[in-house]
Image: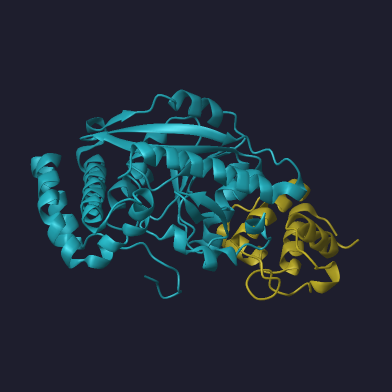
Amino acid sequence: MSLENELKELIIKDLKLVDVTPEDIKDEDPLFGEGLGLDSLDAVELVVILQKNFQIETKDMEQSKEVFTSIKTLADYVRSKTGAQ
Amino acid sequence: MADSQGKRQAPSYGNRLGFWFFHLLIKTAGPIPAYILLALILPYYLLIRISAGKSALPYLRHRFPEYGKVRLFFATYLHFYRFGQTLIDQACMGILHKDKIRINFPDKEILTRLARNKKGMVLLTTHAGNWMTALTAMDKIGVRVNLLLNLDNGEGGHLKNIFNERDDFRLIPPDGFMGGLVEATNALNSGEVVSIMGDRSEGARSVLIDFLGEKASFPITPYHLALATGSDLVVLLTARTGMLSFSIDISSISDGEDISDSSRDETIKNMAEKYVYLLEKHLKFHPYMWYNFFDTWNEIEEKSKLARTDINSK
């Protein structure tokens, strides 16, 4: 499974997104606001997902703004931190 | 009242000149003349700034449902007088320094012990009593205390320097990235304490809880933070007990254990109910010490739609 799909499944499961499948989420769609429609409470879960599953912290807020933009930016960040493919 | 982004703002209870004058009075003559001046100008203020006075009515009507108009007016006066005294005491903290303030905080050792578990702690605070000043007493508990607070106004400005000067504290601006929640989550994951308000939704997802006889809206953010990070959740309530004197009570209402994924909404609602129970109990003994000034009961329609899951129907 690609890292992008793994992230999509984690987000759907941990954020309890109803009636959303990994196929519904495009890699470059915005996660917040328009797009997937996540909000700040979901950002809490995203931080926890990154830490629990990839042991990655997101301490730099400027960087976090970029990282939390889309599935693609999230996956790129995970790859840059873990070397995952 | 709403800002340019449509977000409601707390009513302002003073202007720059007023704060400056009270500051000067406290600095030169201490708090007592400031209390007296407050008592004298308050009737004028309540009559001129009717909208400010009205902002207390939703709470006072629920707290004193048997009151008619005349008694409500006097209750409003007393409410604002207590609030003004609290602000004067708060200013004294910054102007006269901490050793002039008497803080009765019998459970600080318990809080310290919990905080040193390093599992993270959400410190659920309330616009009650000297709550902002009380946070300065959270120093030296062994871990850093992060304050998800906006102190960029006349009322909180005196304390901002105190928090900024100390390593024990860090201010997280709620108007930052994701409302400061990413920073708050990081802090909890690092075993630190995060202080967050529990009695004002302000556009956040919320849950409806019976409060003083009617459903009212309370934010779910504190509970969500605690459950997502496995942090303890401790309620902090304060009361002004006299001139430059106040007490702090804490109650632990969760150890951050989520009973199961499927019932997280229910867990959140239970936690919120425990908090509201403690708040009601506090207001029974300190009826003029809740300074929310939002119509918590009238936000139901707007806020209930913001919950992604149907937490309010359970």
- In the image, taking residue A26 as reference, residue B78 lies left or right, namely left
**Residue B283 in picture, x, y percent from top left:** 38, 41
**Residue B109 in picture, x, y percent from top left:** 46, 23
The chain that appears yellow in the image is A
Which residue is pictured at 36% across the width and 52% down the height? B65
Q: How is the image coloured?
A: by chain
Which residue is pictured at 76% across the width and 68% down the height? A72
> With respect to residue B92, does A45 lie above or below?
below
Frontmost residue, A21 versus B112? A21
**Residue B63 in picture, x, y percent from top left:** 37, 49
Which residue is pictured at 36% across the width and 62% down the height? B10
The chain that appears cyan in the image is B
**Residue A47 in picture, x, y percent from top left:** 67, 53
Residue B245, image quadrant: top left
Residue B12 visible = no
- In the image, taking residue B10 as reference, residue A2 lies left or right, namely right
